[in-house]
Each structure stands twice: as C-alpha cells, then as structure tokens.
C-alpha cells in the first residue's frame, strides 16, 4: 500500500474471492460455477465480425438485451437494470441507499459488509437463528437498507415468499434488496412483488444457473424510479459497464430457457444424490436450495477437510468465521465430479475413524 491512499480506504478489509488457481487442474467445487458450458447459441454469438466491432463502444443503454429480458420476465425495460456482474448492482445499491445504515445477517454473502465499509455505512448485523434460518421478525420495520440473499449463502437455506413479503412490506420507507443469485436451483423469485412494492430491489445474475460467470452479467428488477436511481449512478461511474461480447452472449442465453432449466434439474438431482451420500458418511448439512452443499463432519475440522481435499486435487470453500468454521461449502458439479469428490472424501474420513 502506498502512503498516498486515502486513510479510510487503507483500513478496508477487501472482499476475498474464492481461489482460481491456474497451476494445476482441480475438481473445482469452490466458487459455485456451473459444471455445464453455455449453450451452443451463446458460443455461436461471438463471430469474427463481433471481434472487429470491439473497436466500437458498447450500447450504454443495452437496449436489445433489456428488451429481451423484459419479454422473458414479463416486465418493461424500465424495470430492468443491467450490470457488470450482480456485484455491481449491489455496489450501486449500497452507494444509493445505504446512507441511513444497512442491515443483513451475520452469516451471508461476504460482499455486503465490504460495500458497507467502502461507503462508510453503519451495518447492523443480525445473527441467523441457531438452525441458520433468517430471524424474519428482526428484519421488519428497520428504516435502513435491508439486504437478504435468498437462498442465503453459504447456507443455501431458502426463505419462503411470505416471509420475504413480510420483510418488504414492513420496511416501506427503506429499500429491501433480495439477492437471488441462486433462486433457479429450487426457490421462488420475489420478482412479482416489484409491482406491489416500490421499495423492493430483486438482484440476479447470469453467473450461476446460466453458466456465464466469466462474462460478468448481472441485473436488478425494481420499480422504474429505483432503476432510474441506479442508472444515475451508472452514468456517473461507467456507462459502458457491459462489454459488447457479454451483451451478445446475454441475448442468446435468454433464448435458451429450456437448456438452462434442464441443467438446473440435473444440478438439483446431483445435489440431492451427493447430500444423501454425505449423510451416509456421517456429514451433517443444511437444507440447501442452491447449487452447493454446506456440510460438516464431527470427526474432522472444516479447514482440515478443505486442506486434505485440496491436497488431493479437489477445491471447496472454507470460511474462517467462528460460527461456521466446522463447515465447508461444496459446489454441486457434474455427477462425475461429485462421484470423484465423494470417493476422495470417504478416503479422508475413513482415515479419521
Ligand atoms: C455469486 C454471488 C453473487 C455475485 O455474482 P456475480 O458474478 O457478480 O453476478 C451475488 N450474490 C451472491 C449471494 C452470490 O453468491
């Protein structure tokens, strides 16, 4: 760090992404990417001409992609915000709505506290209940920016739509963000509620269920006034936040609903299969409705299992946080990857009995 950096920023604890090692080939179950490639239509979208057209700026209004999204989701383009990954929508929302403070659970997506710190926002951290479910009452009537990941990460636990609506309706004078990065793996989206509540921002991404983490495409759905706020920030920071190739790939991806639905079905099936096998090995886990399993075993520490797996070529995600240090978050990969993971895990656990 240089001596020139603004002191407040120098004190920040930045977000730590999951490892993306480039040295050797791992079975990569640590960052919740899809085991399946984007559909052929997406691959075909990037033609030679499109590469030549990279000399031109991208469309700052993302007109075609927004129109297509509006069609697919039954909205008008004015309800849709597009961003460079959903992290960027979250970033702008904290910037726009966090001045009065923000509130989120103790165990959730790590970026929320980073954004709060980045903007000097005071955070109220509400502990999940002992079974890792959200304490819904504690999120009602807050008069602060409320942020909930649903399903939550890294627990995978889903909050029902009635509970989501209770949180939204009881905070009429502040924004409620529902981060639905994993909603396609077994949840019901809060999207229909944006027509009823002008304080709801539903955030989503192409990174997980749509196999496009590397393209960086995320979105927000909300009342058009909220979208206008976010646009104001976008035009004040980076109007070309989505590159030309990603815009094209996103449009094609939206045409492949059936392909993605089938991938999600396979991932859910593999999740349930893997969970059963892990239970038979003595693991305990949450009821995940996401594309990962959050599990612990009484005979081995979380970090110890993470390290043993890494040594054998399998990457999972371990979090140091005291409350969840016994756990690992295991992305649901392909059936073949999970068979291999189970076999290696059985070997490690077997050595512990
Ligand atoms: C993965 C993830 C995101 C961010 O994804 P992007 O790649 O930036 O779209 C947002 N929220 C949660 C809870 C996530 O797990």
Image (spheres, helix red, strand yellow):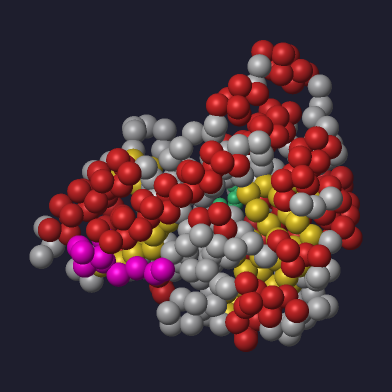
Q: Is residue 56 positioned above or below 317 on the image?
A: above
Question: Which of these two is toward me, 44 or 234?
Answer: 44
Please state if 320 lies on the left or on the right of 238 as rendered: left
Count the marks: 0
The residue furthest front is: 258
Q: Percent position (x, y) of residue 76?
A: 84, 50
**Residue 94 appears in the rendering:** no
The residue that appears at 39% across and 69% down in the rendered structure is 286
Q: What stretch is highlighted in magenta?
A: 278-287
Task: State which quarter of the image contains the C terminus.
Answer: bottom left
From the viewer's side, name the closer residue of 17 and 249: 249
The residue depicted at 77 percent of the width and 45 percent of the height is: 71
Question: Where residue 295 appears, x then y in whole percent?
Answer: 34, 64
Residue 340 is inside the magenta segment = no
Q: Is residue 23 above or below residue 140?
A: above
Give percent across and percent down for residue 347.
15, 52
Q: Residue at x 67, y 47 (%)?
A: 218
Q: Nearer the viewer, residue 56 or 43?
A: 43
Q: Residue 160: horizontal and vertical position, in percent? A: 58, 73
Residue 163 placement: quadrant: bottom right
> In the drawing, does residue 112 fall left or right of residue 290?
right
Q: In this view, does 115 lie to the left or right of 126?
A: right
Asked if residue 291 shows in the view, the reply is: yes
The residue at 59%/55% (across/down) is 181
């Amino acid at each position: 760090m240089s001596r020139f950096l603004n002191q407040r920023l120098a004190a920040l604890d930045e977000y730590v992404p999951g490892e993306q090692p480039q040295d050797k080939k791992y079975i990569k179950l640590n960052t919740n990417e899809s085991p399946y490639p984007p559909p052929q239509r997406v691959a075909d979208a990037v033609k030679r001409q499109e590469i030549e057209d990279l000399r031109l700026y991208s469309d700052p209004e993302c007109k075609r992609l927004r129109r297509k999204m509006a069609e697919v989701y039954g909205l008008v383009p004015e309800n849709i915000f597009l961003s460079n990954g959903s992290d960027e929508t979250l970033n702008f929302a904290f910037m726009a709505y966090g001045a009065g403070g923000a509130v989120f659970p103790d165990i959730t997506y790590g970026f929320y506290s980073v954004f709060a710190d980045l903007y000097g926002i005071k955070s109220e951290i509400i502990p999940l209940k002992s079974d890792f479910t959200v304490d819904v009452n504690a999120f009602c009537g807050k008069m602060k920016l409320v942020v909930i990941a649903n399903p939550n990460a890294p627990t995978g636990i889903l909050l029902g739509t009635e509970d989501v609506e209770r949180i939204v309706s009881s905070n009429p004078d502040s924004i409620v963000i529902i981060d639905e990065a994993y909603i396609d793996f077994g949840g019901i989206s809060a999207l229909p509620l944006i027509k009823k509540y002008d304080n709801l921002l539903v955030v989503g991404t192409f990174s997980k269920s749509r196999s496009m983490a590397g393209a960086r495409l995320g979105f927000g759905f909300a009342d058009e006034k909220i979208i206008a706020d976010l646009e104001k920030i976008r035009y004040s920071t980076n109007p070309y936040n989505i590159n030309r190739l990603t815009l094209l790939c996103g449009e094609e991806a939206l045409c492949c609903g059936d392909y993605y639905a089938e991938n999600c079905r396979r991932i859910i099936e593999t999740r349930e299969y893997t969970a059963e096998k892990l239970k038979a090995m003595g693991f305990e886990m949450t009821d995940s409705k996401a594309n990962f399993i959050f599990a612990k075993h009484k005979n081995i520490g979380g970090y110890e299992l993470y390290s043993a797996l890494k040594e054998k070529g399998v990457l999972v995600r371990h979090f140091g946080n005291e409350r969840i240090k016994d756990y690992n978050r295991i992305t649901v990969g392909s059936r073949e990857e999970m068979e291999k993971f189970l076999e290696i895990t059985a070997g490690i656990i077997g050595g512990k009995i």
